[in-house]
Amino acid sequence: MGDKLKLPGNPKDVVMRFAPNPNGPLTLGHARGVVVNSEMVAKYGGKLILRFDDTDPRIKKPLLTAYDWIEKDMEWLGAKPDEIVIASDRIPVYYEHAEKLIGLGKAYVCECEREEFKSRKAQGQVCACRESEESLDGWKQMIEGKFEEGETVLRIKTDMHHPNPALRDWVAFRIIKEDHPRVGGKYVVWPMLDFESAIEDHLLGITHIIRGKDLSDSEKKQGFVYGYLGWDYPSVIHWGRLAIHEYGKFSTSEMSKAIAEGRYSGWDDPSLPTLRSLKRRGIQAAAIRTLMTDLGLSLSDITVSLENLYAENRKLIDGTSNRYFYVEDPVKVTVKNSPCKTFRMPLHPVHRGRGVREYALSNKNGEAEVFISNDDACKLEKGDVLRLIGYCAVEVESVEGNPVCKTSNEKTKGKIQWIQDGVNCKIAKPEGTTHGLCEKKCTELKVGDVIQFERYGFVKLDEKKEGELVFYYAHR
């Protein structure tokens, strides 16, 4: 971890939290928060809390399966939480603190129309609701469901002349009459994230918070609540935004909609930036951890390429991934004067002790038929001399229809992989699915094995079907 990740003052027994909205699985963007918080806890001692901020039953409606997904995603990243808290289980706790603030005269029920209050706020004018002595009664009526959505909210009193309008008497609770996936219709008054998080950070004993510099208003809003209740605010470390170049802007709600519309096969579709997708493709958790820790805690916004992640992953899997041939969109090639021989190639070019792939080449009337990829076939020109890796050198005699070659002793100008009697396979890639043939030896692989198709890239065996193998593409 080095000096890139450190807390001021060298504290001990820190308590930190990762607080996602469980409306989908974790993404590569979430991984930064998971990894850095867990690294800090490991370095300074203490505990990591996973808190599900699930108090929006409509706009960011929780997905029941996501709670388990997120917990498993964190464990896969090597960041198993020490404690798990679910906000929707603790609504009465937030109600209790709301009533306390009302009693202190620091919160009030506001029945102003939204646009009316917006206008007053812009002018720094208070509304009549602010000094009403009936706020507690109004609050109880809100909880009992006697108001409709939009008719009333609970506001935290601040300073209506604050230079930042966003901090003027901000909304702490609103009415949402929609069933919550976990607690159904038990509650109709739901806390805003700034209020819920403020209460929980104190009650859970959070010592340090890492948050985006764009969320500084949250800290200022919550500061009013902490001041009114006589609490000390946790230490805060701000960092800049992280963007992944290849993904652009992906929101969990947008992904959910696209999956429902059939534009993606699921949350682990190879095109998506979810950890489920990356894991399925063969990206190692350790590679993600290294990438995220190396980014440090910079206040500057950062854009990184997936190539940075792939470089880290390649270091981890290159030595363990056996090599095989794969030809995409196969094209048959006739080899005249083909030698009768057994094809032998090492499973790994460096770790020779692992053994070899061995095939007896069939040869009929001095000719052999093999398959090469359509991409290689399209580049062939008459007279080209190239090497079929591990087999023989050939000279191209004809490219009309299926190419015809003859064995040659001339100096080759290139080499390509080939297959004579292969197995049908398909490879799911971010840009789409490809089909081709791979070596028969691949049928001995286990689901989950990561290999390298030579001159193509690293892949992970996802499924073994009758007559077909399904791989997910990792990277070159």
Image: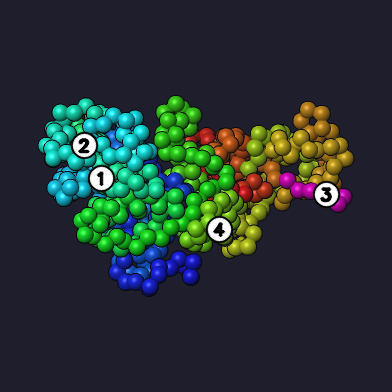
Q: Which residue is mark 3?
A: 413
For numbered disc 4, what is the local secondary structure? Answer: helix
Q: CA distance from mark 3 to mark 1?
A: 75 Å
The mark that comes first in sequence, 3 or 1, is 1
Q: Nearer the viewer, mark 3 or mark 1?
A: 1
411 magenta-colored: yes
In this rendering, position of residue 126 left or right of residue 333: left
Tell me: residue 305, above or below residue 146: below
Residue situated in front as seen by the camera: 209 or 83: 209
Tell me: residue 357, above or below residue 427: below
Q: Which residues lie in the magenta part?
A: 410-416
In this rendering, position of residue 247 left or right of residue 417: left
Q: CA distance from mark 3 to mark 4?
A: 32 Å
The numbered mark at residue 312 is: 4
Q: Which residue is mark 1?
A: 156
Colour convention of the picture: rainbow
Residue situated in front as seen by the camera: 406 or 251: 251
Give the residue type at disc 3: Lys
Tell me: residue 37, above or below residue 362: below
The x and y percentages for residue 421 are 63, 39
User: Where on the picture, by quarter, is residue 394?
Assistant: top right
Residues packed near mark 2 inside 10 Å, few (<14), some (14 to 19) or many (20 plus): some
- Residue 463: tell me if it is visible: no
Q: Nearer the viewer, mark 3 or mark 4?
A: 4
For the point 33% across and 36% down, the residue is 120
Residues packed near mark 4 inside 10 Å, few (<14), some (14 to 19) or many (20 plus): some
